[in-house]
Image (spheres, rainbow, N blue to C red):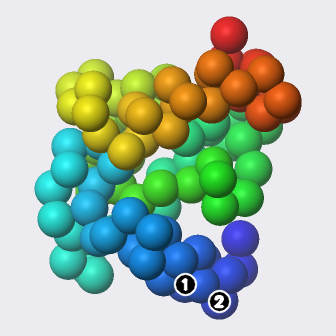
Amino acid sequence: MSPKSKRNKIEKLIELYGSFCCWCCKQLKDSEITVEHLLPKSYNGSDALDNLCLACRPCNNSRGNRVFPPKYSPQSIGCQKILECLKTPKHLPCKQLK
C-alpha cells in the first residue's frame, strides 16, 4: 500500500468508525494510529477497505497473524467485522479463516 493510499484509507476508516482502536476501543491520537488487516496478509488478506480497521500499536503488534489479539473486547469493531465476515459465505477471504 502506497503512503498516499494508506493515508486515504486511514481517513476513510476514521470517517466510518471514528478514531478508535478496533480491538480495545481506545481513542487514538493521529500519532498512535496503525492500520490493521482483519484477515492477516499472511492469510492472503487484502488492502481492501472492508479488510482494514484502525488499531493502536500494542493491539496490532500483540495480534501478530492470529484472528483475534490475546486481549480484545468482544464488542469491538474488529471483532464484530470478523464475526460478520465469517457468517457471510460470499466473502471469499474470510472463508480461509474457517
Gap between marks 2 and 1 measured at Cα? 5 Å
- The residue sitting at 37% across, 45% down in the picture is 77
Tell me: residue 14, above or below residue 44: below
Q: Residue furthest bottom?
A: 4
16 or 71, nearer to the observer: 16
Based on the displayed image, in which of its 4 quarters is residue 76 positioned? Answer: top left
- Callout 1 amino acid: Arg
* Residue 5 in the image, given as x and y percentages of width and height: 68, 81
Q: Position of residue 52 (x, y in %)?
A: 56, 54
Q: Tell which of 90 and 29 is nearer to you.
A: 90
Q: Which mark is residue 4?
A: 2
Specify the amino acid type for callout 2. Answer: Lys
Q: Which residue appears at 84% of the width and 29% of the height?
A: 90
- Residue 97 location, x and y as percent? 67, 18
Label 2 close to label 1 by CB (< 8 Å): yes
Crowd rating for badge 2 (residues with CA inside 10 Å; few <14, some 14–19, many 20+): few
Image side of residue 1 versus residue 74, left or right = right
Q: Image point 55% across, 30% down: which residue?
A: 84
How many discs appear? 2
Q: Which quadrant: the N terminus? A: bottom right
Q: Residue at x 32, y 70 (%)?
A: 18
Would you name the residue on which mark 1 appears? 7
Percent position of residue 49, x then y? 65, 61
Residue located farthest toward the left when viewing the structure as drawn = 26
Question: Label 1: how many residues lie within 10 Å, few (<14), some (14-19) or many (20+)?
Answer: few
The image shows residue 24, relative to residue 19, as above or below, that is: above
Label 1 element class:
helix
Instruction: Give above or below for 8 relative to 96.
Output: below
Q: Secondary structure at mark 2?
A: helix
The label shown at residue 37 is: none
Q: Quadrant of residue 89?
A: top right
Q: Would residue 89 appear left or right of 66 to someone viewing this image?
A: right
